[in-house]
Image: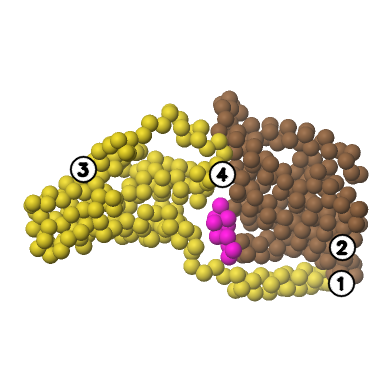
Amino acid sequence: MSEFLIMLVSTILVNNFVLVQFLGLCPFMGVSNKLETAMGMALATTFVLTLASASSYIVFNWILVPLGLEFLKTISFILVIAVLVQFTEMVIQKTSPLLYRVLGIFLPLITTNCAVLGVALLNLKKDSSFFESLTYGLGASLGFGLVLILFSAMRERLNQSDVPKPFKGSAIGLITAGLMSLAFMGFAGLAPV
Amino acid sequence: MIIIIAILVLLSLAGVFGALLGFSAIRFKPEGDPVVAQIDSLLPQTQCGQCGHPGCKPYATAIANGEAINKCPPGGMATVEAIANLLDVDVVPLDAETDENPIPLVAIIREDECIGCTKCIQACPVDAILGAAKLMHTVIESECTGCDLCLEPCPVDCIDMVEIPTTIHTWSWSPPENHKLKANLIVTDGESL
């Protein structure tokens, strides 16, 4: 049990996918302009990422390994992720049409969120068990959601503040992300890598 | 040989996923367009037609399809801001001839000239005109939205649009400059107001 907790802390804070491993930066910059949108994106990504890491484990270990087709892993993972994203898109369109409208192009773009494929491939590299993969995916997505929401709250305030002209918009956003990343490096040592 | 197995595996994976998606597309089919209903509930429901649409619901449908959100004079800036917040778009100043903060108008019937034709009663979208055939009509001022739809049908031109005078009850301090900027430090602050 405790190893799963350590794994969660490790993926959420110490090895945060966005701020420490620099994966999934496009939705991090793209959907962080408004707090509510960021929350919706965080939820959708959590759903996709957790399910994707579990189902890519199943596809790899139950289908590809017995047939000796390990070299198909990248393409089949992308297939799995794309299907999950499509599915999430349908569910969101049904349950929250407003969120669907607001997320717009960024919802199908979860497919190309490098963190999602990154988690699936890193799971293989670490040779994790099924539950370890699930925890890793959950932790990664919680970490992604955490920094996305924190960052969007800061950006809402940045939008209202008096920023020098050359730094307006994305520029100050990237600087802020860099500072956040520095801050998150302070978590190193909290849990083993 | 392995190539053929690989192709077969990929094909069958794609087939299974396709079937899943096809099933969920039927299962999660959205009914109607709930966004239209939410926009409609923000419009003032005067059905005045000043936006160029036959009523509030058609205008809500048009907004959902990308029409400008600033064509509703009875709703004023408050409606524009509410819709902008709902759809996560920028607030634009109210369209057309009216100023940003139009002086509220109210219709007044010159009662000694009224012939009791009831034509203005039928024209009024909010039922703010009281009266009966061949009897004098009058306007319930608190219900009148100042949409001026009753001016046109009146055969004797006995209806005037007058500005609502500032009384000791309606006067208020003018807001400080840039109050919109300062009032909502973050976007979500606006919701609790």
Specify the amino acid type for callout 1.
Met
Tag 4 subunit:
B
| Image coordinates for residue B159, horizontal then vertical, percent | 15, 50
B149 in the magenta segment: no
Q: Relative to B156, is A25 above or below?
A: above
Label 3 residue SS: strand
Q: Nearer the viewer, mark 4 or mark 1?
A: 4
Q: Quadrant of residue A47?
A: bottom right
Which residue is at a point 75% across and 51% down the rendered structure image? Answer: A142
| Residue at 25% in and 38% down | B165
Q: Which chain is yellow?
A: B
Q: Does the image show residue B160? A: yes
**Magenta stretch encompasses residue A99:** yes
Query: Disc 3 and disc 1: Cα gap in Å?
Result: 88 Å
Q: CA distance from mark 4 to mark 3?
A: 37 Å
For the residues beneath circles 3 and 1, the answer to whether they share a chain is yes
Residue that numbered label 2 is attached to: A130
Task: Depth check: give the residue in front, A120 or A54.
Answer: A54
Question: Residues at marks 4 and 3, common chain?
Answer: yes
State how far apart marks 4 and 1 are (Cα): 60 Å
Q: Main secondary structure of the magenta part?
A: helix
Direction from residue A139 to residue A42 in the image, left or right: left
Q: Write down the colour of chain A.
A: brown
Give the residue number, with chain letter if any, for mark 1. Answer: B1
Coordinates of residue A180 in the picture (x, y in percent): 73, 35
Segment colored magenta: A93-102
- Residue identified by numbered label 4: B188
